[in-house]
Image: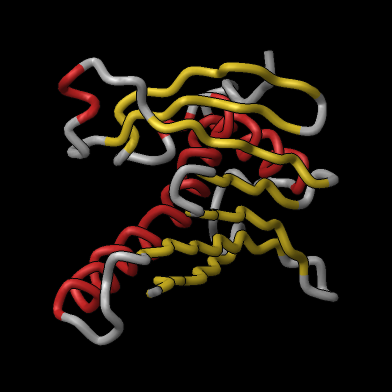
Amino acid sequence: MVLISFSTVVPVNPPDTTPMLSKEDLWTALVLKARDPKQFVPVIEKSEIVSEDESGLTRRVWFRGDGDDKKGGNGVEERVSFVEAMKIDFIIPATGQRVSNIMSTTPDGDLYLIFTFEWPHPELEAGSVEVKELERERGELSRGIVPRTVEVARGLVRDGLLHLE
């Protein structure tokens, strides 16, 4: 089995960035991303919450280009766990895919956002052309989605739209 994995980290408030995001702002944005990911994750066509409680939610997600979005299919079930206003885990039980969104601070108080991605592919052979192409594609995706999440959060703060309903 092949496991394609990546981790990407970005500073949340680099110098000369406005508005600055607090930990509370970033957490609220991550919860919004879990509830309605379209504006944060361009590969998501649509999503709907199946159930939700204080520890997380279950949602159905339709990804662009997987064919299911065009057929009116059932989408993919994803379980989302909120961990102590610090981390959100997204797991697709059918495939074993796992993504974690983690907030971290340095001893100096600088805020960082880290995403880890794990894509299991039991059908692929290690070192194959298919694996190398998936690693390239998934690497681009992971490196783009983390800064996009911060920028969407910053835009929501700037526009006065960052709040949970």
Foreground residue, 88 or 162? 88
Residue 107 vertical placement versus 29 (above, below): below
Foreground residue, 2 or 101? 2
Residue under the point 55% across and 69% down: 9
User: Which residue lies most toward the bottom here?
Assistant: 127
Residue under the point 77% across and 22% down: 53
Image check: 45 left or right of 76? left
Count the labels in the image: 0
Image check: 136 left or right of 89? left
Foreground residue, 85 or 60? 60
Residue 13, given in percent of the width and then of the height, sits at 61, 59
Residue under the point 29% across and 73% down: 135
Foreground residue, 120 or 31? 120
Residue under the point 41% across and 29% down: 61
Hey, which quadrant is residue 10 in on the image? Answer: bottom right
Residue 154 vertical placement versus 98 (above, below): above
The colour scheme is secondary structure
Residue 62 vertical placement versus 109 (above, below): above
Quadrant including the C terminus: top right
Hey, which quadrant is residue 24 in on the image? Answer: top right
